[in-house]
Image (cartoon, rainbow, N blue to C red):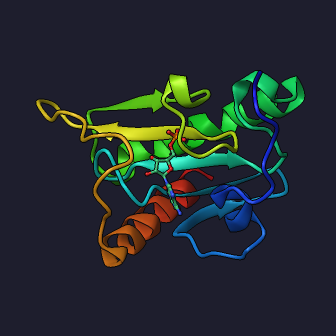
Amino acid sequence: MTASYDVDNIFAKILRGEIPCHKVFEDDNAIVFMDVMPQSTGHTLIVPKAPSRNLLDADAGVLSAIIPLIQRVAIAAKSAFGADGITFMQFNEGAGGQTVFHLHFHVIPRFEGEALKSHGRGMEEPGVLAANAEKLKAALAALD
Ligand code: AMP
């Protein structure tokens, strides 16, 4: 049986402002911030505010509203970090590779010839994350 949503998961705490993040964007529906253990430069998370563990229990309306934001972040990230491509990832339940149980989407800039680093390992320097958040914010603003 699948576990239920835990209101004390780390992304719920970020959404409530109880712990900090390197925020790039926020509106009524979602927050976007830098992954603290990036698998490549500019690895970004898009997190719907509505509570669900993952894709499997998410509201279909939440999913359809989030896709255009994911596209915007992907386009902005490609430009901000001079990437050659973007990998989009999303994990469901522990067996599916999920480690934080609040629905989120990974946008990962990719560079020709550069392999992805391991998932959820190797903390980045806060200064680097802050600088990357600023670059991505500027690239998002440039899309308007
Ligand atoms: P997953 O649940 O496997 O899709 O991945 C969770 C992701 O969240 C991993 O890539 C982690 O590096 C990242 N992560 C975990 N804690 C934080 C945090 N406090 N702030 C930003 N990213 C985080």
Q: As displayed, is residue 144 above or below residue 68?
A: below
- The percent coordinates of residue 115 (x first, y second) are 18, 33
| Residue 9 or residue 28, whichever sits in front | 9
Q: Residue at x 45, y 55 (%)?
A: 35
- The percent coordinates of residue 119 (x first, y second) are 36, 40
Please state if 82 lies on the left or on the right of 56 as rendered: left
- Classify residue 21 by image quadrant: bottom right
| Residue 85 or residue 99, whichever sits in front | 99
Q: Residue at x 41, y 74 (%)?
A: 130
Work out which quarter of the rendered image holds the N terminus and state it: top right
Q: Is residue 100 visible?
A: yes
Q: Is residue 90 visible?
A: no
Number of numbered discs present? 0
- The percent coordinates of residue 132 (x first, y second) are 38, 64
- The percent coordinates of residue 23 (x first, y second) are 57, 67
| Residue 81 or residue 19, whichever sits in front | 19
Q: As displayed, is residue 14 above or below residue 62?
A: below
Q: Residue at x 37, y 75 (%)?
A: 126
Residue ranking furthest to the left:
113
Q: Residue at x 79, y 51 (%)?
A: 49
